Image (tube, helix red, strand yellow):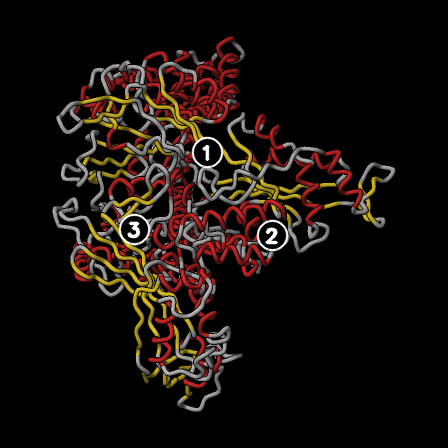
Amino acid sequence: MTIRKLLIFVPLALTLILLQSYLWVPTYEEQTRGNPNRLKEFITASIGDAAILNPILSADSASSTIESMVFEGLIDRDENLRFRGRLATSWEISEQAFFYINEEASIPGLGKATPGQVVAYLKKARDGKLTVDSETLASLQNIKAISIIGPREFEVTERQKKAGTLKAQEIKLHVFAPARIKLTLKHVDQDLFKYLARVLGENYFASFNPERYVREESGKETDLRTYARKILPPVEHNPVIVFHLRPNVIFHDGQPFDAGDVKFTYESIIDPRNLSPRISDYEPVKRVEVIDPLTVRIVYKRLYSPALATWSIGILPRHLLNREALRKEAIRRGMDPAKFTMRQSNFNRHPIGCGPFVFREWKSDQYIVLDHFRNYWEGPPNYERYVYRIIPDLLTQEMEFYAGTVDTYNVQPHQVQRLQSDPRYQSFSGLSFGYTYIGYNMRRAPFNDRRVRLALSMAIDVDKIIKYVLHGQGERITGPFVKQTDYYNHDIKPVPYNPGAALKLLETLGWKRNAEGWLEKNGKRFQFTLITNSGNELRKAVMAIVQNEWRQIGIDVRTDLVEWSVFIKERVDKADFDALILGWSMGIEPDLYQIWHSSQTHPYQLNFVGFKNAEADHLIVKIRQEYSHNRQVEYCHRLHKIIAFEQPYTFLYVNKWTAVLDKRIVIKEVDAKGHVTYKKIKPTKTGDYTFYFNKWVKLPRVPTFSLE
Amino acid sequence: MLSFIGRSVIQKLVTLFLVSIVSFLIIHIAPGEPSQVNPLNPKFTPEIVERFRKAFHLDKPLHVQYFYFYKDLLTGKTTSWKDNQSVLKKIWERFLNSLPLFIVGTLITWTISFPIGIRAAIARGGIYDRSTTFLAYLLISIPGFFFAYILIIFVVTRFHVPVIGMETFGLREATTIHMIMDRIWHLLLPSVLGATGGVAILSRYVRSQMLEVESQDYVRTAKAKGLPPEQVHYKHALRNALLPFVTMFGLILPGLIGGSVIIESIFSWPGMGRMAYEAILARDYPVILTVNFISAVLVLAGTFLSDLLYLMVDPRIRL
């Protein structure tokens, strides 16, 4: 019967066709060892695909990994996390400071003074001809030049929102600015005006009344005072960074790189049409000036020390993305040139920069391929090809690593012990830039008492959490800075685990255990809810352990797992929680303003625990205004101490990562005589093992190293 | 017939309109923001968030957003928020990736289930029938991801050949036939996995249909008049048992755009399911809604198609 035969034959044929394909597939053996080209490529795997390959537009980690290969910034950080020049060979940071002549104030020993007199007086003080204290003298001697900017008259149009209406109203202000003194400083000095006030009189700056010099033209009702303060600030700091750029650097398409590209990159970021997520980093910039093709000068509106680090952003090629180029692309693709922005450009999928690797190919959710750049200014990387494979499943990643089609694998905590001792691989580990904590809502009793928070911290055995939940792959942390930076204060010891002492501390505060064993004060049970987001197994485990430990000392803790977006929107943003478990991932810069400053405690702001401390506020502002690393470190250590003392969070742990790498990958160095030496890959002080990636090379067999 | 088609099309258009409204509302009412707006990133000032919301029209009332979205969709101008790519282009690429998986999976399901089910029905109660029943339940109950891992580990450690991705990674200088065979090999495991559930269920279904038909009077008559058993089973019984499957054929259509998130993730297959899943996580509304809309269209077209097919194969039905 034909039907019967058909029913048997068709599935058989299908099975055969499918199975015979096995015979055609290259084995892993042929792919890796039998393939000499394989030694020239480095393959890495990632869970997620890149979104957009443009350094000013992307915000995800996969994109920034690729961007760091294709693009190059003016500076980056060296082994010790200090800045080093890349596209910039060197840079200088200086300052211009301004203040308006206060015509009403009287200067001690001088009386009311004209601009010329003030300048002469300051010069006298600088030259040591007046009696001033040594700190003031030091600050004065930092002044390189003093000059006068004559009085000016100009008009300003401000937009003001009328109360009760949505429409903004334009108001015209006429300004008669008094003379201004310009001070050129050798180094940035955030305390300059504090010391100048010692010379010119304590109230010289504070009593300057800008309202006198501003007139409202049209007679509309305005808050003149606010506008006047904005237009004529009594004092102003303008830090200046001058970058000297590296000559003879070219983009991958052969076009030379110059200062215009730096300016263009900045302009693209602040262009609101581009919706750059990095715009807030560059908001403090006043202007970017091209002095000559190899010199850029960046003037800032105010003191903002994290500014230097922002210049590690990849520099975009102006000739490919300027208005004209975009307009042409829009027309070519049949789109409306008026609405076409950098976000729509094909550049974002075919990036061109001046980094060590040239973009070759991107297959969405499969791989991104880069080739080394032969004309890279530091010499081409040893690897000829860099491949970024997207493998969303960790187990498949692991299988591919064992098979040799991926060169590195990020080990999961429970596998660390096994893979670290595997003789086939070399392994590296380090601390990640982030920590997990329990935050207490300090607006609510009893968390408004530091001693209660301390007692809660003392009742948690963090070491046990690290041992069992993290499989030992974590370290304790005591404060808000990245542990491997100088900013972290290693003198601060973690809160010791001592439930007995915690209980005693609570007892002194009036919390007594009742007949059922619960802590009670004035007939009210110590009861609250600890929440975290669902979908994070580690946090969930921590939550269960902490709940148990707190219950053991008689605290009635309830727990709740909340879906991430609800958690953020309803609980965190509205500060509607008692205590929560969450984590921060951090950058190296020690700017803590958004998370710890008391001005950031409103709904939708990040200081959601409501931490308020006057000294901390002062230090946070000082840190973001301080340009000297050593002084910054000093302030950070003090701030760390305050936060650790106050315990607004129970700082739990920072995760440890481990990566394994094929043992045949080593560092190849060629000295001036062409003598080749191979070295073992060593991580930097901060644990970064890929720091010398451009010098890596894969050898056909595992080399033996002589004892160093 | 024509009036049936006309009525049916109008009904389906109304349904489609309602689906478009409901899915739009559900996605917008669900909590969460597009991933471009990260509320826990200190660098995101309220102004930037506001600007993003404005660029995505999220500041407008829902009905205006609805209008904007479907206007863009129907003129083919929707772009993904994640990477500003055209959504239709993205879906088309993924569709082409998922298509072979779908075809091979469906082929395996439909060609293998029938012989298994028919045999089980004919030899009802025998050892073969019982063991296929056992196997079917085993395959239904085994979690897909677990089975996938077992298969991958088995094949990789036993045969040392790559199984993940759409093709062997790094296969550049190879002949066309090698390339094709390589692709087929990479299709094998994921489509077998995709088909396991289908085979298990469909073969049970075939069996019960066959059993039902086999107990009909005309089959008994056929047997009684001395026809060879093969002719009874395959001609008289099978033909009539096939009727319900014809309608099922139309219902496979939505599977074209479905794709399995789990299998695609495990096998690093750049298919539809993964794209839609990632879009949901990133709250990439244009992608989610477009996929949703297309699958609604396919479901409706599928039911329509199966109605028509039924009309054609079963002369007893007249409308």
Q: Residue A498, how many percent across, how many down?
A: 70, 33
- Give the left or right position of residue A334, taking residue A551 as reference: left
Tell me, for residue A609, which label it has, or none.
Answer: 2
Q: CA distance from mark 3 to mark 1?
A: 40 Å
Q: Residue A399, how many percent across, how many down?
A: 37, 21
Closer to the camera: disc 1 or disc 2? 1
Chain letter for mark 2, please. A
Disc 2 vs disc 3: Cβ atoms closer than 8 Å?
no
Tell me, for residue B86, which label it has, or none.
Answer: 3
Q: Amino acid at mark 3?
A: Ser
Judge whether residue A25 can be spotted in this image: no
Q: Residue at x 54, y 12 (%)?
A: B125
Q: Amino acid at mark 2?
A: Val
In-front residue for pair A705/A538 = A705
In-front residue for pair A223/A164 = A223
- Residue placed under numbered mark 1 in the picture: A431
